[in-house]
Image (cartoon, helix red, strand yellow):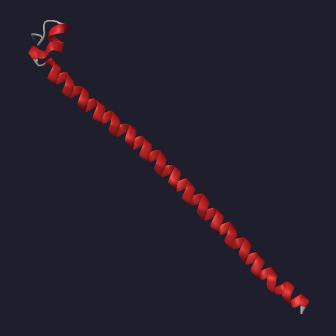
Amino acid sequence: MNPAFNSWAAFFAMGGYGFYIWLAVAASLLSLLGLWVHTLWQHKQLLADIQRREAREQRIRQANQTQGEQVKIAPRSQEKQQ
């Protein structure tokens, strides 16, 4: 089995096309890295949005329970006044 390149310099030169090959490799890796970072950011935003919605629903439920108690209490206090 013969190696394709005799030295590291020949490997990086890629037969005179090294600049274009390594530029394509760099562009591909940067694109994948950007996609990965964007996905992580989106995931974090989605979890934060879900957490905000759940907190809002909890506040609405608590407010509705409090209003329900006030409505139940209000007629009784009005009956005592009459």
Residue 24, compared with residue 73, is above or below; it is above
Residue 45 rendering spot, x and y as whole percentages: 47, 48
Point 44% across, 43% down: residue: 41
Direction top: furthest residue: 7
Say left or right for 57 vs 63: left
Within the image, what quadrant is residue 63 found in? bottom right
- Quadrant showing the C terminus: bottom right
Of 44 and 27, the residue lying toward us: 27
Within the image, what quadrant is residue 57 found in? bottom right
Of 23 and 62, the residue lying toward us: 23
Point 50% across, 50% down: residue: 47
Within the image, what quadrant is residue 53 found in? bottom right
Residue 80 rendering spot, x and y as whole percentages: 90, 88
Point 61% across, 58% down: residue: 55
- Quadrant showing the N terminus: top left
Residue 36 rendering spot, x and y as whole percentages: 36, 38
Residue 56, compared with residue 32, is above or below; it is below
